[in-house]
Structures are given as structure tokens and as C-alpha cells.
Image (cartoon, rainbow, N blue to C red):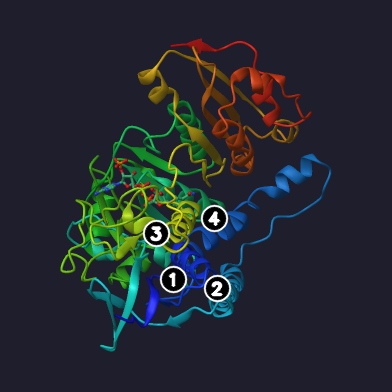
Amino acid sequence: MAFDYDLFVIGGGSGGVRAARVAAAAGARVALAEESRMGGTCVIRGCVPKKLMVFASSFDGIEDEAAAYGWKMSRGDFDWPAFSTHLRSELDRLEEVYRSLLDGSGVETFDSRATIAGPNTIRLADGTEKTAGHILVATGGWPEKPSMPNAELGITSNEIFDFETLPKSILIVGGGYIACEFACILNGLGVEVTQFYRGAQILRGFDEEARGLISEAMQERGIDLHLGTNIVAMAPASADHTASWTGTATDAAMGPDAQTSAALLERGTSDGPVWVKATNGREQVFDKVLFATGRRPNTAGMGLEEAGVEIGRRGEIKVDEFSRTSVPTISAIGDVTNRVNLTPVAIREGMAFVETQFKNNPTPVDHKLIPSAVFTQPEFGTIGLSEEEAREQEPVEIYCTSFRPMRSAFAGRPDRVLMKLVVAQESRKVLGCHIVAPEAGEMIQLAGIAVKMGATKEDFDRTVAVHPTMSEELVTMREPMRTA
Ligand code: NDP
């Protein structure tokens, strides 16, 4: 049977676009449908605008540091409308780049939602059906709010980039990548940030020492972090809430100033400030509440189960190591498969899919030892096992140092950095490398090559230090801090 296309990709994010382009370059007739903007989460409402906001927020306090270095600078104000206008035009430009890359590769694009109507059939939003020899689902994920009354009053990371004006105060719920990154960003932009995390320490799953240092640094920078805390109730702020707050607040610092109270009495709408009651009994009114409580694979209403595609408990598409689903003509890559939810991983999965499906070269994706960064302030770069994970596995030596970097020490700033290697006692391999420092993301990309190659502690030691840098400590730590 002749199909309209060899490959139909659903989803124009990083993974889908890459797979479409590479398949087209391999000679396949390819189409791609995207219901929102081309570029997907990473480009439009994720990594790219987030990193630009990280840059914007990093100028906070720069005048004090510059003064220590002899510069006479006065503090200016942050102009959100100016920044966000620039940000939007940059995202428009990047979306165009994605479109022209697809056009240039000969991929036919549809600005439409697409669902699966059969093993080889795709239905567009207007009802048109297309057929393809193979379908690739790359629909990503979507932020998930907790199911609680009035949760709709909270926003998600999707809406952060669309603020008309910056809120004066925000409550961020969650302790993962997104919660911690936006806590730091918004704090740096001058927003009063409160963060609730239900567990004992933020960034669950990462190295404990690194988590502890980041948590301390975030609080030192002014983030009001409450561990072991969650929301129990929320509602549009009203006159009642304001009154009960001033009457019952146990902590004076939690109360609104007179000006805010007056504003709340006037507003009290669902777009306006939100009253929140926490598990610790405290109540507070915030201009915004941001739920950064995880993301869910975008599989709802896609026709996947009807076509026989197996879906997992979290709503993810179940795939094998070649990204093949339970239906031979349908594959899936990226966050919709909920394997390792990172842009570069989705891109790898897309390219491996094309190798397997269109180049007769079955290629699994290696999901082990993936370096990543959390763009908090300070940044966190990490690869491999945390100390806690490694100790469960085998006897280890821990090499670790924490110090004030030269730049901060000279400026009298309290910032500390952390360099840590987790080493297997027997094989001497570096099982994990964890860096908390400015530009840790840049550092871990390079250290990650060595760790991925299976470098031993002695390989690190044989490498001459680059002096004076922060990361030279990675090759100069001679004695283990502890063994376990
Ligand atoms: P995460 O899964 O990392 O974090 C979700 C957080 O929300 C956790 O702290 C979780 O707590 C908490 N949580 C979940 N449900 C509730 C609830 N009902 N009430 C209160 N708290 C809750 O998700 P994110 O949304 O932060 O990020 C999604 C993914 O996106 C990441 O896993 C990552 O793969 C990717 N990402 C990567 C980035 C990077 O590479 N720099 C940046 C941003 C995102 P608990 O720990 O107790 O489960």
C-alpha cells in the first residue's frame, strides 16, 4: 500500500524536529504536525527562555561586587517589560529558525493538532487524514498541578514567560529542577520568593552534600524556603483572608504591609493575589502561586491506546531500547516516553530512531551517565552516582572540597563552591562528579567526558591543574575526605 509519507512526526519540539530533518536527509518523505509553536518546550517555554532569564537575574548585586573591584556603579532597576519584549522577539526568531530548518530539509509541516487514527493513519484537527509507513510520537510533556480545590489559581512554568508585570511576591511549590531554578531566577529579578517543598531537602535524588549547599545558598540569597511544607488550602485573596491573617498570624513577618492589604481588599479576584494556608498552619497572601510539581507525558486524547499502543502508569508511552512501541509502525521519543526528560536526550533518541528505522542500523540510546545541570544560583552540574547511591553499590572513597572562590572572596561575598568526586575503591573509577559553582553546567560537560570514558581517580590526578580556576580542585584533591 502506498502511504502519503514514509514518516509522520507528531510534535515539533527538539526531538521531533531533529528526527524529521535527519529522516528527510536520509531520503524519507516526511511530514510533521505541531499544534502549538514550532520548537516545543525547550525553545518556547523551557530551557531557552529559562536560561535567558537566568542571565537576566544574574546581574542582581553586581554593583556591590564591581565596587570591590574598583568600579563605581549605581544600582539600576530591572525593567521586565523591556526584557520580556526582547525575549519574545528572540523566541519568534528561534521559531522561524526551526521552521526554515524543516523547510530546508523538505519536511512538510502542518500547524495542527494530530492524533492517531490507526497504525498508519494520522488525523489532523480539521478531520483530514494522512497515512504514513511509520509514525513517530514526540509530543513531550505538560506541567501538572496537584489535584486540590482552587489549584487553577496557581500558574505553571508555561505562564511565567507571559507575565505582563513581575509579581511582587510569589509562592513556588516543589523542590525539583523547575521550582529551584525559578526560585533563584525570580529572587534575582527582585521578586519576594517563598518556596514550599514537601520533603526534607530540595532536589531529591541528587547528591546530598550538593543539595545541602544549594539549599543554604538559596536561603542566604533571600529565598524563604520552607522544607517539609505544602499547601493545604488556597483561595482568591479576599477581605476575610486579610482580616483573619492579621488576626491569627503567628509570625509578624508573614503579614502583608498596609498597602498590600488595601490592594487585596479592593481586588480579591481569581486573577489577583492568592491566599494560601500551609501545612505548618501559617497563612499568607501571594501575588502569584507557581506549581512546579512535575510534568506529565502528553498522551491524553491522542488515540494511542485505541491503536494498541501500551501506556504506562504515569501516562507515558512504553518503548523498547529502540524507541519502538507495542505497535510496530509507531515509535515514540522524548518526554512523552518519560525516560530521561532532557532535551539532548530527546534529540539522541530521535537520531537513534532514524538510524534504526531508516538507515537499517539498529541503534539503542545509551541512557547511562548523562551529565546535566540545574540552573540555580549557584549552578549545579552533575554526572553519575551520588555518594548515597554509590555507597549502596560498592565501597567508595569520597574526595570533596568546599571553599570560597577567589572572585567572591575578594568581593567579600559569602558564596561557597563544592567540587566532589565519588570514586570506586576497587576499580578506582570515578562513579560520580558533582559541582556546585558558577558555570557548573559548563564544567560538568567537560568533566562528563572523562567520567563517561571510565576515567579513574588516577587519570584525574595525572591531569595538570589549570591555575587559578575553581575546577582545578577536581585534579588536585589527594586524600579522600572519607571512605564508605
Ligand atoms: P520534578 O519531578 O523534578 O520535581 C517535581 C517536584 O514537585 C518535586 O520536588 C516533587 O516532590 C514535587 N511535587 C510533586 N507533586 C507534588 C504535590 N502534589 N505537592 C507538592 N509537591 C509536589 O519536576 P519539575 O517540574 O521540576 O521538572 C520536570 C522535569 O523537567 C525534570 O525532571 C527534568 O527532567 C526536566 N527539567 C530539566 C531542567 C534542566 O536540565 N536544567 C530544567 C527544568 C526541567 P518529591 O520530590 O517529594 O516527589
For the question of whether residue 167 can be seen, the reply is: no
Q: Quadrant of the N terminus?
A: bottom left
Left or right position of 138 against 355: left
Q: CA distance from mark 4 to mark 3?
A: 20 Å
Residue 342 or 86: which is nearer the viewer? 342
| Proximity of marks 1 and 4: CB atoms separated by less than 8 Å | no
Which of the two discs, 4 and 3, sits closer to the camera?
4
Q: Residue 124 got which mark? A: none
Instruction: Give the x, y percent position of residue 126.
Output: 28, 89
Residue 200 or 347: which is nearer the viewer? 347
Q: Give the mark nearer the N terminus: 4 vs 2.
A: 2
Dot 2 alpha-carbon crowd within 10 angstroms: few under 14, some 14 to 19, many 20 or more? many
For the question of whether residue 399 can be seen, the reply is: yes
Residue at horizontal 55%, vertical 73%?
Answer: 98
Q: Give the mark nearer the N terminus: 1 vs 2.
A: 1
Q: Which residue is mark 2?
A: 98
Relative vertical location of residue 374 with respect to residue 105 in this rendering, above or below:
above
Q: Give the mark nearer the N terminus: 4 vs 3.
A: 4
Which of the two discs, 4 and 2, sits closer to the camera?
2
Q: Residue 258 got which mark? A: 3
| Proximity of marks 1 and 2: CB atoms separated by less than 8 Å | yes
Q: Quadrant of the C terminus?
A: top left
Q: CA distance from mark 4 to mark 2?
A: 33 Å
Q: Which residue is mark 4?
A: 190
Secondary structure state at the residue bearing disc 3: helix
Which of the two discs, 3 and 2, sits closer to the camera?
2
Q: Give the mark nearer the N terminus: 1 vs 3.
A: 1
Instruction: Give the x, y percent position of residue 266.
Output: 32, 72
Q: CA distance from mark 1 to mark 3?
A: 48 Å
Q: Amino acid at mark 3?
A: Ala
